[in-house]
Image: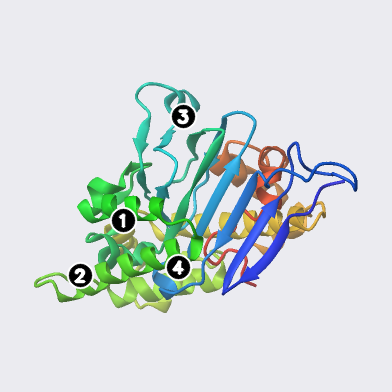
Amino acid sequence: MAVSAGRRILGGMERRTHPGGPGAGHTAGRAAPEPAPYEFVRAPRRLGALVPSTVGYRAAEEQPRLHRGLPSPYLTLVFSLDGPVVCGETPEHARGPDAYRAGVLFGGLHRTPAYIAQPARQSGVQLALHPLAARALLGMPAAELNLTAVDGAALLGRGAAELLERLQEQPEWEERFALLTGYLRDRVDRAARRPGVRPGVRAEVAEAWRWLARSGGAGPVDALARHVALSPRQLGALFRREVGMAPKQIAGLMRFERARGTIAASVAQGRPPDLADTAARCGFYDHSHLVRDFHRYTGLSPSGWIAEEHRNIQAGGHRNGEEWAP
């Protein structure tokens, strides 16, 4: 029987842990368990839609492991508190001498998994950034940032490296989250005051994204184009210019994100996921369509991904942005 993750709400933060490991399952008269090997602490959404998710994480395992960083409709920004994040575009790349290494790591939109060589012990903060907020938060559109991984300190400037040092000095998640919120809010304010810089995006693109999000990525692109009074070709050109992908590709990421969240929710509750029902509710043609997309985005079948990520899921991982919204 699976061991349930612990869950607490503290000062607006949600904390989830999974006991697992050597200390799990102790009984009266035995030594107290060791600290939970997985911990995820979710911050309140203080920057609204600009930053849908901010999660502090800590893991302590018996040995290093290779983790899949899955595609999503969000940009990713990680501040690692225990040495650099080491990752690559393939397992061999992540384990090799040419792997990407950065204490502040940025990941753009992508449609295949990134591979992270995780040490036995790690901690940090991971943020999901809305692609349409890239101009305000990062100073350029997301289309110019479609990289699997890049040194976030080089992208954001010296202030990011200084922020990482301050985060490492803070012992509590609440103080770390406050520092991050202040840093990002300051970037948005400075972008709005910078002469000649337009931090916003075209209204048609913003409305098209909202329409796709409301449908969970299940709406037809022709209907979307009519909704924003553009031809499909015009809309595609605007999307690629802003986020580096066509509306159909973004819709696919949204469907996958919703399906992955639905499957993870079932696993976290100790229930076997109903893939046929998930496919129907998340806008896939059928069960086979869902399985094909899982292979495309993860390199695994849904059951293979569940087996690989079971403990992460139970501890509250794989909850990004708005993916669990009804």
Q: Is 84 located above or below residue 171 in the figure? A: above
- 266 or 301: which is nearer to us? 266
How packed mark 1 is, by other alpha carbons closer than 10 Å (few <14, some 14-19, many 20 or more), is some
Q: If you read the primary sequence from the N terminus, does the residue marked by circle 1 or circle 2 appear first? A: 1
Per the model, the C-alpha gap separating discs 1 and 4 is: 44 Å
Q: Is 192 located above or below residue 89 in the figure? A: below
Q: If you read the primary sequence from the N terminus, does the residue marked by circle 1 or circle 4 appear first? A: 1
Q: Is residue 67 left or right of residue 182?
A: right
- Residue to which mark 1 is pinned: 163
Q: Nearer the viewer, mark 1 or mark 2?
A: 1
Q: Nearer the viewer, mark 4 or mark 2?
A: 2
- Residue to which mark 2 is pinned: 191
Q: If you read the primary sequence from the N terminus, does the residue marked by circle 1 or circle 3 appear first? A: 3
Are circles 1 and 3 on residues that touch, CB within 8 Å? Answer: no
Are circles 3 and 2 on residues that touch, CB within 8 Å? Answer: no
- Residue to which mark 4 is pinned: 222
Q: Secondary structure at mark 1?
A: helix
Q: Is residue 269 left or right of residue 204?
A: right
The amino acid type found where label 4 is placed reads Asp
What label does residue 90 carry, if any?
Answer: 3
Q: Is residue 319 left or right of residue 194?
A: right
Per the model, the C-alpha gap separating discs 4 and 3 is: 35 Å
Q: Nearer the viewer, mark 1 or mark 3?
A: 1
- 171 or 25: which is nearer to us? 171
Q: If you read the primary sequence from the N terminus, does the residue marked by circle 3 or circle 2 appear first? A: 3
Q: Residue at x 70, y 54 (%)?
A: 263
Q: Quadrant of the C terminus?
A: bottom right
Q: Secondary structure at mark 4?
A: helix
Per the model, the C-alpha gap separating discs 1 and 3 is: 30 Å
Q: Secondary structure at mark 3?
A: loop
